[in-house]
Amino acid sequence: MSVITEQSSSSLALVGGRLAATDEKVTLVIRDGRIEAVTGPDSNHGADRVIDVSGCLISPGFVDLCCNLREPGNGQKGSIATESRAAAHGGFTTVCASPETSPINDSGAVTNLILDVAAKRSSVRVLPVGAITRGLEGELLSDMAGLAAAGCVAMGNGSHTVGNARVLRRCMAYAQTFGLTVMFSPENRALAADGYAHDGLVASRLGLLGIPEVAETTAVMEMLLLAEETGVRLHLSQLSCARSVEMLMEARRRNIAVTADVAMHQLLFTDSALSGFDSRYHVRPPLRSESDRQALLAGVRDGVIDAITSQHQPHDSAAKQAPLAATEPGLSTIETTLSMGLLLVQRGELSQPQLLRALTESPASVIGCRAVIEPGAPADICVFDPGEVWTPSASNLCSVGLHHPVPSRSLPGVVRLTLCNGVIAWSLQPA
């Protein structure tokens, strides 16, 4: 197989594929970056170029609410060019860029830099998330209105915390004034302390410093109460605990404006992955127990958890080659997110419609967008073969980070074609 990236012609027809939502065989006609028609398989499309996608499913492009692109930065861990290319390989057409850049995205100037570089080098649509506090230090509020005006779709603190409840309340109240969505990864740093693994039997057996579930759940409860008082649109990022799902469900019953996501690796792995002191699985929040994993899956199935994210965090090799406690947390996941989800489908833990909803329309709605296949919509398309298998390796991955969670394992689901605004961002064609 060879990888091909090219500009689309003025009109393009995808023939022979089936809509993922209905399993209906269709011809998809794309013109000037938008979907012109969704017609029958034998219709006369009149397109300049035809691509046969027989045997594949056609889905809206995936939307990632948490992706680290590492630019601006020193380039050692990746760049907008490399990581957006990886996103396209994974079927993603829209990624929300974490504010954890260098310098931090806490000003309109940095936001404009990200958007300018993305316009020149990105294979997919990049939507910056602005830092809600200056320098992500959790003390002084950033210029949220200025960040939104520059192009940020939401405000957040990345993997950092706002430890002062008074500052957190002010952040939410200020964001609500301007109608902004706030994204927080809930963690009480005092309770998490120096931990780096789930505080359970595996950590006790291996002598690892644990992070108790209450470090997340107390933060979830605080954020929900403050969101209820301020009326802000709250998004809880990367939940990991069963009790968090219960509190989220209760908050929905109280009509609190809250949405949530979970990282794909939290749905597939538990803390037992650390049994061999494998530093790849040093992630934050930590992989937790099987009962937590089952509760998270139930949350996705029921729609209580809106979205599945990649939580893509590419690192250079040195960042993962120290003893477990000294390594940097995070997995390089955006290229295998779909395949990991299809493993869950094969195991009967998610249905394919549930998986695709959590990768497309639900995360899009969190940021006020739509991910649909219908006439007039932007041609953001992922074409994948759910029955074909592939094995991730350094030779076929695009991300700088090679610490992916499923090495040397055959995975279902090969992305054959990714279109962003009608432009081919990723294509696999026979050599």
Image (cartoon, rainbow, N blue to C red):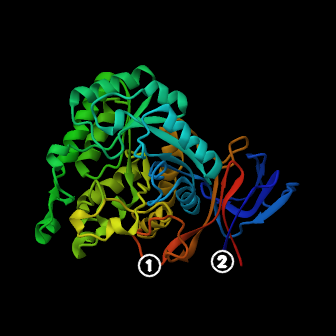
Front-most of residues 323 and 60: 323
Q: Position of residue 389 (x, y in %)?
A: 54, 76
Question: Which element carries disc 1, helix, strand or loop?
Answer: loop
Q: Which label lies toward us, 2 or 1?
A: 2
Quarter of image, res 279? bottom left
- From the image, which quarter does the C terminus lie in? bottom right
Which residue occupies the extreme front position in the image?
74
- From the image, which quarter does the N terminus lie in? bottom right
Q: Position of residue 398 (x, y in %)?
A: 54, 66
Please name the residue shown 27% across and 41% down the image: 161
Q: Is residue 426 left or right of residue 212?
A: right
The image shows a total of numbered marks equal to: 2
Please name the residue shown 52% across and 58% down the image: 83
Question: Which element carries disc 2, helix, strand or loop?
Answer: loop
Q: Is residue 39 left or right of residue 141?
A: right
Tell me the amino acid under the disc marked 1: Arg
Work out how far the residue at label 2 is from the one at label 1, CA to CA, in angstroms: 19 Å
Front-most of residues 363 and 134: 134
User: From what the image shows, is residue 134 above or below residue 91?
Assistant: above
Instruction: Answer with mark 2 or mark 1, whichever residue precedes in sequence.
Output: 2
> Is residue 356 visible to the viewer in this orientation of the structure?
yes
Please name the residue shown 12% across and 71% down the image: 205
For label 2, the crowd category at 10 Å Cα-Cα, with few meaning under 14, some 14 to 19 and many 20 or more, is: few
> Is residue 269 visible to the viewer in this orientation of the structure?
no
Q: Is residue 430 left or right of residue 223?
A: right
Tell me the amino acid under the disc marked 2: Met
Q: Which residue is mark 1?
A: 409
Q: Which residue is mark 2?
A: 1
Front-most of residues 413 and 9: 9
Q: Position of residue 117 (x, y in %)?
A: 59, 46
